[in-house]
Amino acid sequence: MSKMLVQPIGQKRLTNVAVVRLKKKGIRFEIACYKNKVLSWRSGVEKDLDEVLQSHTVYSNVSKGVLAKSKDLIAAFGMDDQTKICLEILDKGELQVAGKERESQLSSQFRDIATIVMQKTINPDTQRPYTISMIERLMHETHFAVDPHSSSKKQALEVIRELQKHFPIKRSPMRLRLSVPQKNFSSLSEKLSAWDASIISKDESGSQFSIICEMEPGFFRECDGLVRNLQGRLEILAVSVHAEGDTHVDHYDDHEEMPSSLPKETTDSVVQLSERSENQTLSHKSGTPEGETKQNKCSTCNAFVGDAREYREHFKSDWHKHNLKRKTRQLPPLAAEECLADMDMDDSRTDLKEYSF
């Protein structure tokens, strides 16, 4: 019996591609694209279709190289023009990614959402922001799931509203400077009282009356419209206002261990952290007193950070990480207070650049 070598025909196998899939009228269609080009096409960066598609061909299974049947194309799209169908799948289809890649994208977006929530919220008892790890833990407790098709800022605002139902958290106020003609100040003052805005300072110069206040971000659009109608000017001084103090960055990890659902214990822990901060500052100035454990010095931050446990925690702190970045740029280290101010300044610049409600 003669043996005959049978080779498959009608199959076009493609590997190392990005697959866009669209299911229409119960039939699955796929197209083969170049990696990292699909998102560029959808955002309008890439205009050349040939730079996006590996071939102007519609498949039923790209990985196996099985082409879609003409009768299925006509039944689903009402035509068999491969290029037009490819365009529709490219615009409406779902980009297929590997499991680990999808997990990495969702993890990264989850972290971005938590960062935005941290920047825009405070603890109403301490008037300070929660740490990023505490925000992530609260998000896990509310069973938050990332939507890869929605923006991080939109989801962050939804997370804030959900967290306010279960935990002591609120939006950090905005600090604004409002300047209106003196004759219109009474109307502005009434609205500020209705919005429960706190007045920081007032200044009168000629016919203009200027006021610096803090208010809830939810009233910003309405306030902006009111100031325009009153022929005034609005200036954003700070997108997010947090309480100022001497709490060090490297003590935040200890604060995270306190239960978020117990405001009284949280307040007590803040007091203990402040006392501990003062003791560490004194020991840094006067040396290691008798009876205390040996102080470990961090050469990167040029500071004493306590015993072995505190020394290990210090390496996880934003203070140490910030000074590491400065060290790579051959810049001198900053103290904890200076580091906090420097990071707040960077965050304010970022928020003002991408400011949107």
Image: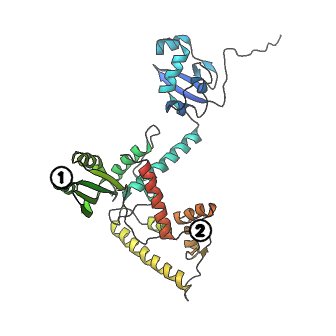
**CA gap, disc 1 to disc 2?**
50 Å
User: Which residue, as the protein is rendered here, is positioned at the far bottom?
Assistant: 290
Single out the mark in the foreground, 1 or 2. Answer: 1
Q: Position of residue 232 (x, y in %)?
A: 25, 50
Q: Is residue 127 above or below residue 79?
A: below
Nearer the observer, 55 or 7: 55
CB under 8 Å between discs 1 and 2 = no
- Mark positioned earlier in the residue sequence (1 or 2): 1
Q: Where is residue 347 in the image (x, y as percent from the top left)?
A: 45, 56
List the residue tagged with mark 1.
184
Is residue 331 at least partly visible in the picture?
yes
Q: What element carries label 1?
A: helix
List the residue tagged with mark 2.
332
Please state if 120 lies on the left or on the right of 20 as rendered.
left
Please state if 17 lies on the left or on the right of 269 as rendered.
right
User: Which residue, as the protein is rendered here, is positioned at the far right?
Assistant: 2
Q: Is residue 232 above or below residue 289?
A: above
Badge number at residue 94: none
Q: In this view, does 82 lie above or below 36?
A: above
Q: How many labels does the image show?
A: 2
The structure residue drawn at horizontal position 44% and vertical position 44%, both measured from the top left corner, is: 152
Quarter of the figure with residue 5: top right
Q: Which amino acid, by three-letter code, is at mark 1? A: Asn
Q: Please identify the quadrant where the N terminus is shown.
A: top right
Is residue 133 at least partly visible in the picture?
no
Q: Is residue 60 above or below residue 251?
A: above
Q: What element carries label 2?
A: loop
Nearer the observer, 180 or 8: 180
Q: Which amino acid, by three-letter code, is at mark 2? A: Pro
The structure residue drawn at horizontal position 25% and vertical position 63%, both measured from the top left corner, is: 202
